[in-house]
Image (cartoon, helix red, strand yellow):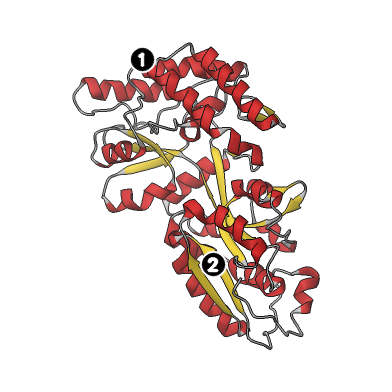
Amino acid sequence: MRTTILAVTGLALLAAGCAAATPAPAAKAAAVLTVWADDSRARPLRDLATAFQKSRGVQVKIVQKSMGGLRDDFISQAPTGQGPDLIAGPHDWLGKLVQNGVVAPIDLGATASAFPKLALDAMRYEGQTYGLPYAIESVALLRNTKLAPQRPKTFGELVATGQKLVRDGKADFPVGLPVDPKAGSPYHLYPLQTSFGSSVFEGDKLAIDDRGGLAFAAYLRGLARAKVISTSLSGEIATDAFREGRTPYLVTGPWDAPALARSGLAFSVEPVPPAGDRPARPFVGVQGFYVSAKSANPIVANDFLLNFLATPDAQRRLYAAGGRPPALSAVREELRGDLVLTGFAKAALAGSPAPNVPAMDAVWGDWGLSQLAIITGDGDPAKLTRDAADRIRAKIAN
C-alpha cells in the first residue's frame, strides 16, 4: 500500500460512524489513497479522485488493473502492505475476500436506504456488510425489433419465431444464446434453469440436480437437437450475428449495450422469457467497492467510499463509463428515459444475486462441462447432471 500515515484531527469523527451524508473535515497531513480498478472504472474514478483531493487535501491514486487478476493480486498483496486501500469489483468475490481476511466491514448508515435490497444483500456476508454497491447487472433478452416486432411471452415462442425466420431465409440463427466451447454457459442459461424451479444452491445445499434441474437438462438437450443452441455459437459470434441482423435475439448483459447502440441497430431490452412454468431469474451481479482490512488509512478510505463514491454524481459517472445500471435507486429513476438501461435494470431486479460464497469456485467448472456434454449429446442429460453435482459436492467437502 502506497500510503503515508495520517495525522488528522477531525477525521476521527468518521472513524466512529462513517456517516455517509456528513462532509468530512480536511486532512491535515499528506496521504495517498490507492484504488485498484479495471479500465471501465479507472477514468471516472480519476475525476472523483481529483474532487476528493480538492476537498480533503488527500491524493487518490487510481491504479488500472486487469479484471482477470485483480482479486487474486489483492488477496496476495494486501497482507504484505503492498495492496491498495480500496478495490472495485463484483459481489461474488466477497466470500473469498472475507475468507482471506483482506476486506473490512463498512457501515452504510442512512445511505443504505438509497439502494435496493437485492444490492445490499449481495454485499453482505455472514451478517456483515462489506461493499458499497454502485451497479447491478444481469443478462437480458435483446430483440431486433425489425425482425421480431412482438415480445415473446415464453422461450418457446421465441424459439418458434427464430426458427421461422431461419426457414424463411431471414436469419442464420434462431437465437444468439452464447456457449463457451470450453466452459459451457451456466451464467447465460441460468434464467432458463430457474424457470424449471431449479437453482444453484438451496440454502447451503447444491441444487443443480434437483427435480427442476433434471427437467432443465432434458430441455437443454432438446434445444441442441433442434439446433437452437450449439457449442459453436460463442459469445463473440452470437453478438456479431445479432449486430449484423443474422439472428433476431441475443442473450447478453449491459456490457455489450454501448457497442450495439453505436451500430445503429433497432433493438429492445427485456427480461429473458421463461422456458418452464416458473419465473426466469438470472444471476445478478452487483458491482461495488471494498475497503482493505490492511489499509493504513481506513478513515480516509471510508471517507472516500461513503462521501464520494456513494453519491449520485459518482454513480452517474460510473454508469456513463460502463453502461451498467446504477445501484442507487434515485439515479436509475433519473435515467428512466434510457430504454436500454431501463430494460437491463428491470431484468436484473427480477433476478437473484449470484452466491458470494467461496464454494462457488468449485461449481462453475463441472457445471459448465456437464452442459457442454448435454448440448453435444455426449451422454444422458440426467446422469451427466447428477455426476457433475456429485463431483462438485466432493470438491466443496474437501
Vertical relation: 355 (above or below) 215? below
Q: How many marks?
A: 2
List the single residue furthest toward the left: 169
Residue 77, x across and y down, in percent: 60, 61
Front position among marks 1 and 2: 1
Q: Amino acid at mark 1?
A: Arg
Residue at point 53% right, 43% down? 348
Residue at point 59% right, 40% down? 354
Residue at mark 2: 314
> Residue 225 — which label?
1
Residue at point 41% right, 28% down? 152
Residue closest to the eye, 136 or 291? 291
Q: Is residue 264 visible?
A: yes
| Quadrant assignment, res 205 | top right
Cα distance between the residues tagged 1 and 2: 48 Å
Residue at point 22% right, 19% down? 167
Horizontally, residue 244 falls left or right of residue 140, namely left
